[in-house]
Amino acid sequence: MLSQFKVSQKKLLEWYKTYGRHDLPWRNTDNMYHIYLSEIMLQQTQVNRVREEYYPQFLQKFPSLKALSQAPQSDVLAAWSGLGYYSRASNLHKTATICMEGLPNTQEELIKLPGIGKYTASAICSFGHNQNIAVVDTNIARVLKRFFALLNPTDKKIWTNARTFVNEKDPRHHNLALMDLGSLICLPKSPKCEQCPLKDECQGQSEPEIYTKTKKKEYIALELFYGIYIKNNQIALEISRERMYKDMLILPRVEPIEDDFLANFKHSYTKYRLNVKLYKMEKADDEMVWIDLNKLEKAPISSLTKKAFKALSHQEKFQKC
Ligand code: SF4
């Protein structure tokens, strides 16, 4: 460790003791499955939604890797419903079947498992085993770019600086502190430098935003048409092959016919802004899956499909179709 960082490392840990997010349940456990699950959920979902809804509910249904490995994939996808990026759930399930007795404890082994990349492997090793390694997520990257005044750095450069800065005496809390600093103080816009424990040594403090300029987000507007076919109180759904909804049950796409229009609603995910229109279908294909309307809540359906049923529920035409 380079001595010039000792002062910053110490200030960072002191700040974390007082202001860190110590109440997050996955920070108060040494259960590797719980830590792993939280890291996968947090990749695309806000902390509060994970903490309050999805993390406790998922653990109640699948309390261990073994329990997860023994569950049908459709149950795992149903428990993931609403979180999006469903390949995360199928990869969790695959990993559980490979490691039902426990996860490996090295980055090299973890990274070979489905859905575990460099960040997740390092987070599991650092947060779960207190290994002396760097962790870089979006928040940490922002802090490091500013602290080291890195203009347009490559990922490799950021990871190299992260490794140089790791506090070998307490790597777990050092990484958690950097994560919280990025989330609470070193904000993307208007960082609160006056409250920052690193302000005296931060090389980018005079113009923090030039190190983390992001391109203005561009959105793509799409109009999508889905079909509704109901028979004997059951609805016909398709098994999705799209990456986003992989193995989830979705409504089939149709060509719009004006007379069959039932309802429409707006839906957004990532860069997409969708105008979704629903149409009555005349028949279902043989390979479609029939789901009882009373059991839809427990089926592996996406939030877009849930929204479709909500939009339909008040339609008189739907009651009759
Ligand atoms: S001093 Fe400001 S720019 Fe530097 S790490 Fe702290 S909050 Fe970020």
Image: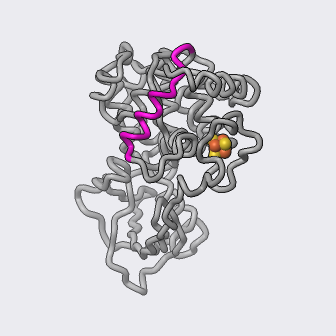
Q: Against 184, is 240 above or below?
A: below
On the question of residue 279 being in view, the answer is no
Image spot of residue 93 (x, y percent): 36, 31
Between 255 and 174, which is closer to the camera in this rendering? 174
Q: Find out whether residue 166 is within the magenta segment.
A: yes
Q: Against 317, is 215 above or below?
A: above
Q: In terms of image quarters, where does ligand 1 lie?
A: top right
Between 59 and 237, which is closer to the camera in this rendering? 59
Say which residue appears at 40% left-offset and 51% top-offset.
291
Q: Which contiguous range is marked in magenta?
A: 154-169
Q: Find out whether residue 110 is within the magenta segment.
A: no
Q: For residue 258, what is the image quadrant?
A: bottom left
Say which residue appears at 47% left-offset and 52% top-offset.
151
Judged left or right of residue 116, residue 11 is right
Judged left or right of residue 13, residue 229 is left
Image spot of residue 92 (x, y percent): 38, 32
Image spot of residue 231 (x, y percent): 39, 62
Say which residue appears at 37% left-offset and 84% top-offset.
257
Q: For residue 139, what is the image quadrant?
A: top right
Say which residue appears at 46% left-offset and 27% top-offset.
164
Image spot of residue 143 (x, y percent): 57, 41
| SS assignment for the magenta stretch, majority | helix
